[in-house]
Amino acid sequence: MAISPQNFPRKRRPSAGSFISPTLSDRRLVQSLLLVSQEISSLAPLQFLLKRNSVSIIRKSNLLAFLFEELLRNPVSCFAPTAILCFEEMYIVLQRMKTLIEDCSNGSRTWLLMQNESVSNGFHELTLDLSTLLDIIPVKGLDLVEDIEELVLLIRKQCSETAAYVDPTDETLRRDLLKMLDQIKREIVPDHKKLAEIFEKLDLQDSASCSDEIKSLEEEFQNQRDDKSKSEVTALIGLVRYAKCVLFGASTPKSTVGGKNP
């Protein structure tokens, strides 16, 4: 049900076990759900790209935590098989949500910007997965208090958006970045002011942050399997190197891609 995380920008790869629901007793399963929902709730929203998408996931997880707390406070003697199945699938979906936010936060910002639409769709698909599970779960059989039942209905409603949200500001910035890459490819000197504006919006505002971005892109290069994606990452590395030199005028140790200085 939940989508694969492999298409998204990341600075690390999660272990396969991160996306396998635990084989636990009913109570331990709910405890695991509470823990992962609290972990998501404690994450900082993405600040420079996909902010609304990440905030939405974090808020929904925070609301889900109230459901799991109630189930632990007033435990049902035995959950119905349908409920157990839904909880197991929900654990997988929540783990994927957590990993997606962390990867977007820790990875390359320029690559994330390039993948803006697909990552927005990823957030949306995970939300739809959660919506499906909340529709299936037998709420009446959970013996919930009225307030928590209404809370579940609220989360269902919040998950029922029909289309992915792609921030128009992010999309404008992505088009600006693509235009800049095209200019460099055609050996046209990019506009200094526009270049500085793009990097400021991505919070790449000094030599050190550009060096970190290059390292993240180098890791992304190693993660890519197809030549097209590798070519795109290489172009981004070239752009960040250029901007680092033009905007901040500093040099750093050798890069692992192409053997050039970051």
Image (spheres, rainbow, N blue to C red):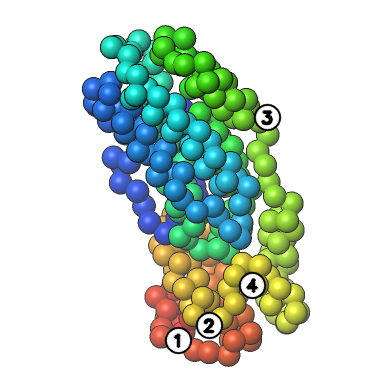
Say above or below: 125 vs 202. Answer: above
Q: Check disc 3: other Cα within 10 Å, few if <14, some if 14-19, many if 20+.
A: few
Q: CA distance from mark 1 to mark 2?
A: 9 Å
Nearer to us: label 1 or label 2: 2
Identify residue type, mark 2: Ser
Q: Check disc 2: other Cα within 10 Å, few if <14, some if 14-19, many if 20+.
A: many
Q: CA distance from mark 3 to mark 4?
A: 33 Å
Mark 1 sits on what residue?
Answer: 252
Q: Please indicate, yes or no, whether residue 62 appears anywhere in the rendered image.
A: yes
Tell me: 199 left or right of 64: right
Identify residue type, mark 1: Thr
**Could you tell which of marks 4 and 2 lies nearer the N-terminus?**
4
The numbered disc on residue 162 is 3
Identify residue type, mark 3: Thr
Identify residue type, mark 4: Phe
Q: CA distance from mark 3 to mark 2?
A: 42 Å
**Residue 215: x and y, percent?**
44, 71
